Image (cartoon, rainbow, N blue to C red):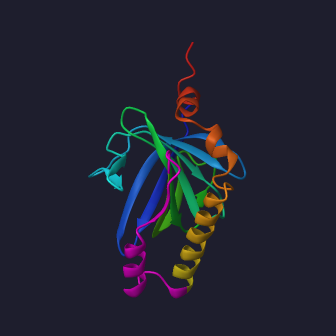
């Protein structure tokens, strides 16, 4: 049975997109959702390599009370490209019994990328700095976002990030939950 979640993803100052995903795991410490057809205006590229494109599948990990989520990114044909952490406000999860559930979060501009080749990068620092300078983020929230990104980068470099659940929930596993077959 499909359990849709509607994720209201706010990007200051005034952009909000709603992403509809299927919840494939609803545990107290992590929510795993699947987006089978990512809507993008243009491909997401890191160091000249496309890491996500329109129509690509993504397995998302939302950790209640954490200041980031994680996406297992793939190309449109399902080739795994790496892990992408959005630095954001802790998601407000409105009732697992809502049909559909409505989650809300605010993008804090910074992102952490860990490619399949092991590269670890902080992304969009210029956007974070600009948003901070323009007052789109309070000083406290901007500092919290930077601290979260720095902690993820340090943990990735020592092999302590991502958490094991991210390796356990592959694209094939998420698809199998939604279409268990005969």
Quadrant in the picture for the C terminus: top right
Query: Where residue 19 sits in the image (x, y, percent)?
Result: 42, 51
Quadrant in the picture for the N terminus: top right
Query: Where residue 28 sits in the image (x, y, percent)?
Result: 72, 51
Residue 10, relative to residue 181: is it above or below? below
Q: What's the magenta region?
A: 115-139
Query: Where residue 65 sits in the image (x, y, percent)?
Result: 66, 64
The residue depicted at 60 percent of the width and 45 percent of the height is 32
Residue 43, relative to residue 154: is it above or below? above
Q: Nearer the viewer, residue 89 or 92?
A: 89
The residue depicted at 41 percent of the width and 55 percent of the height is 18
The residue depicted at 37 percent of the width and 32 percent of the height is 77
Q: Nearer the viewer, residue 145 or 3?
A: 145
| Rendering quarter of residue 36 | top left
The residue depicted at 47 percent of the width and 68 percent of the height is 110
Q: Nearer the viewer, residue 143 or 27?
A: 143
Query: Where residue 111 sits in the image (x, y, percent)?
Result: 47, 63
Q: Nearer the viewer, residue 19 or 153?
A: 153
* Image side of residue 44 versus residue 28, left or right: left
Residue 120, relative to residue 27: is it above or below? below
Residue 57 part of the magenta-drawn span: no
**Identity of the residue furthest to the top in this view:** 182
* Image side of residue 62 versus residue 7, left or right: right
């Amino acid at each position: 049975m499909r359990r849709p979640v509607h994720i209201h993803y706010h990007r200051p100052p005034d952009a909000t997109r709603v992403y509809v995903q299927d919840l494939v795991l609803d545990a107290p410490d992590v929510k795993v959702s699947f987006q089978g057809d990512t809507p993008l205006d243009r491909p997401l590229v890191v160091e000249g390599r496309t890491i996500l494109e329109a129509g690509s599948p993504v397995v998302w990990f939302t950790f209640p009370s954490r200041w980031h989520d994680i996406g297992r990114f793939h190309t449109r044909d399902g080739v795994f490209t790496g892990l992408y952490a959005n630095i954001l406000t802790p998601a407000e999860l409105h009732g697992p019994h809502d049909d559909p559930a409505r989650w809300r979060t605010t993008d804090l501009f910074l992102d952490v990328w860990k490619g399949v080749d092991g590269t670890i990068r902080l992304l969009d620092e210029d956007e974070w700095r600009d948003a901070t300078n323009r007052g789109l983020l309070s000083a406290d929230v901007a500092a919290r976002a930077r601290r979260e990104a720095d902690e993820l980068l340090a943990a990735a470099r020592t092999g302590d990030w991502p958490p094991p659940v991210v390796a356990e929930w592959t694209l094939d596993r998420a698809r199998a939950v939604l279409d268990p077959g005969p």
